[in-house]
Structure formats: C-alpha cells, structure tokens
Image: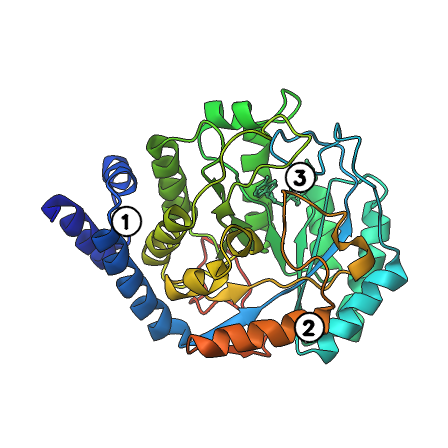
Amino acid sequence: MDEKLFSIIDSLEDTHRLPLQDYEYLVSHRSDEGAMLLARKASAIRDSIYGRDVFVRGLIEFSNICKNDCLYCGIRKSNSTVDRYRLTEPQILACCKQGYDLGFRTFVLQGGEDGWFTDERLVSIISKIRAAYPDCAITLSLGERDRDSYQRLFDAGANRYLLRHETADKAHYERLHPAAMSFDHRMQCLQDLRDIGYDVGIGMMVGSPYQTPHELAEDLKFIEEFQPEMCGIGPFIPAHDTPFADFPAGTLEETCYLLSIIRLIVPDVLLPATTALGTISPLGRERGIQCGANVIMPNLSPVMVRKKYMLYDNKICTGEESAQCRTCLDLRMDKIGYTIVSDRGDIRREKSGSHGGTHV
Ligand code: SAM
Ligand code: FES
C-alpha cells in the first residue's frame, strides 16, 4: 500500500487542489487500489451534486473541412484521403428537430475550422436554433476564432463553447501541432470565451504522443486554475494517414483514473464519458460514468456523413440512426444504475464574479 498516494488523494478530496509535484506523483503512481479509491470518492461527490442523472448532448458534426493540420487528427487538412462534406443549414436544423424529439435539450455544433462558416452564416444557424428551441442550450465547438466572432455567436444565442486546450505544456503543444498553430492563441481564445460569458469546456487527450506524467500534471494544474464548466478528456487514438498513425492509443485505465481526479478537482464540472473512451473499450463509457463522469455525447449527425468525421480509427456509432443510439445508451446507463435525463444539464455552480458564467 502506497501511503503517500492515499494521503495525496485525501488531501485532494478535502481541498480540491494539489501542488504540481503531487499531481505528478498521483499520475505516475497509479495502482488498482488507488484507482478504486479515487473512483469511489469521485462518484460520491458527483452523486452529491448531480445524483445518478446522466446528461446527454446531441452532437452535430456539421463539417469535416478544416484549415488546420493538427498532427493527431484524422480530418486534418493534409489528409487527402478524407471525403469532405459540410451540412446545409436545413440539414443542421433537421438534426436539431430530430434531437429535440428524442429528448435532447443541448445541441453541440462541432466541426473543423471551415472558413465557409462565416460569422453571418453561423449567426443565421444559431439564431434559428435559439428561436425554435428556447429551452435548449447551444454549445459550439468550432475551434479558434477571434473575440469579436465569439461575441457575435454568443449574442446570437450560443451558451457554451468547447475548446480543448489539448495540453497545458507549450513545448508539448508544439509537438502536437504545426508551427502555424499557437499555444498562446489557444489560451487567449479560452480567456476570451470566459470573459464573454460562455460556459467553457477545456480538455486533453490521454496518452497523446510524447505525453509524460509531467505534462498530465500540468494539465491537472491548469484545470484546477481555470475551473472549467466542462472538461472533455478521452484517450488519444491513432488515425491512419496522419503523422501519428503508428503511436499507441491511450488506455481505458488511465483515462478513467484521470476522470476521477478531475471530478475531485472541480466537483461540479460537467464531465463526459467520451465516444473515444467507448471506442477503446466496449464498456468504456459505462466505466467513465462509474469513475465520476456525468455526461454522454451521442451523435445526431445524419448517418450518411458519420463515417466521414473520422477523427481516429474505428470510431463507434457511425452506422446507427440517432434514435438507435439514444435507446442503446438508455439501456447501457440503466444497466449500471444511472438514468439519462431530458434536461439542458447546466452546471450546478453558484454564480461567481470571476467567471461571469450565466447558468440558468
Ligand atoms: N475544430 C474544433 C477544435 O479544434 O476544437 C473541434 C473539432 S476537434 C476534431 C475536437 C477534438 O477531437 C479535439 O479537441 C481533439 O482533442 C480530439 N481529437 C482529434 N483527433 C483525435 C484523436 N486522434 N484521438 C482522440 N481525440 C482526437
Ligand atoms: Fe481541424 Fe482536426 S485538424 S478538426
């Protein structure tokens, strides 16, 4: 038994913060016993805030066209084998309609950084969704834009924004991205989003190339300091025809361990058990929920485009209709004692001046 590990876990549970070196110790001394203890504590704290309800987000992958060349990403610009698509406004609205009828109360518009989607076009889409579904949250995941653009999309009715920081270590960031992309700009975007009033989601891949316990410890420290409303973490999974095609995938165990730690750092965070977790293991999403996650993000995109949004190899749920996915997830959650609810699933956090978030 590793006494030091257990005392660090206790301290994290009590204070929700740790010095950087303790995060590194936690990450590098993972044991089954420690993981079980963390999962128990993380589940208890999640239950005390959210109970056994699981929130669902309907993911609409509206474009796989991207000007970026992230080295890990299956739809990066240089991947000439990808069959590119973008959904039309009526197609996107049809996804929302179908999602609403299936009980979704949050829509996530995600895509590559596709210049065709100007502010004007996005404002048109967002304001139509806002008018048709005033009781729903609109989440954007469109990558880096300038502050003015984020503001216009917010004013049109978007509430939340997912922009994973990918890694909190600048040198590591530069190994995962081409020189044209900047760590400082990504951080600036996150600050802009927060200042505007979005609920902000950050996150990283677990087991990304060149990642060590030190980088993960920096990620955890960044999460502690930023206090995100959402945090998306999933295993890195190699994608063919990318520079990282031959790197190993992250593991279920390490991802679940980190999910538990993140729940203890930010008790009220909205924490998804990601599709990537379900891809590396058949019961990955269930394990994620059992380790402290409370969100699932099934796909609402039309089936005909799903196989084209291949961020990594063997992605699950690319052949099923949205209704099938919804039923499948209901059953999966029910089996482990959780219930998917038809709810916007806002964060349950007291409003605080420093965040400027709007939680209604
Ligand atoms: N373009 C937007 C952006 O940059 O935030 C949203 C789309 S991007 C594909 C969404 C996320 O997918 C990224 O933040 C990244 O963490 C994740 N991702 C990309 N390639 C991946 C891979 N090979 N394995 C696991 N996750 C991956
Ligand atoms: Fe742009 Fe992946 S490189 S979405």
Determine whether label 3 and label 1 are within 8 Å by CB. no
Q: Badge 1, how many Cα within 10 Å: few under 14, some, many 20+?
A: many
Q: Disc 2 residue type? A: Gln
Q: Which residue is mark 3?
A: 144
Q: Position of residue 77 (x, y in %)?
A: 75, 31
- Above or below for 155 versus 73: below
Q: Which residue is mark 2?
A: 324
Q: Position of residue 72 (x, y in %)?
A: 60, 33
Determine whether label 2 and label 3 are within 8 Å by CB. no
Determine whether label 2 and label 1 are within 8 Å by CB. no
| Mark nearer the viewer, 2 or 3 | 2
Helix, strand or loop at label 1? It is loop
The C terminus appears in which quarter of the rendering?
A: bottom right
Q: Position of residue 159 (x, y in %)?
A: 64, 61
| 151 sits to left or right of 24 | right
Q: Earlier in the sequence, mark 2 or mark 1?
A: 1
Asked where in the image residue 145 lies, by quadrant, the reply is top right
Asked where in the image residue 18 lies, by quadrant, the reply is top left
Q: Which residue is mark 1?
A: 17
Q: Disc 3 residue type? A: Glu
Marks 3/1: CA–CA distance: 29 Å
Q: Nearer the viewer, residue 150 or 272?
A: 272
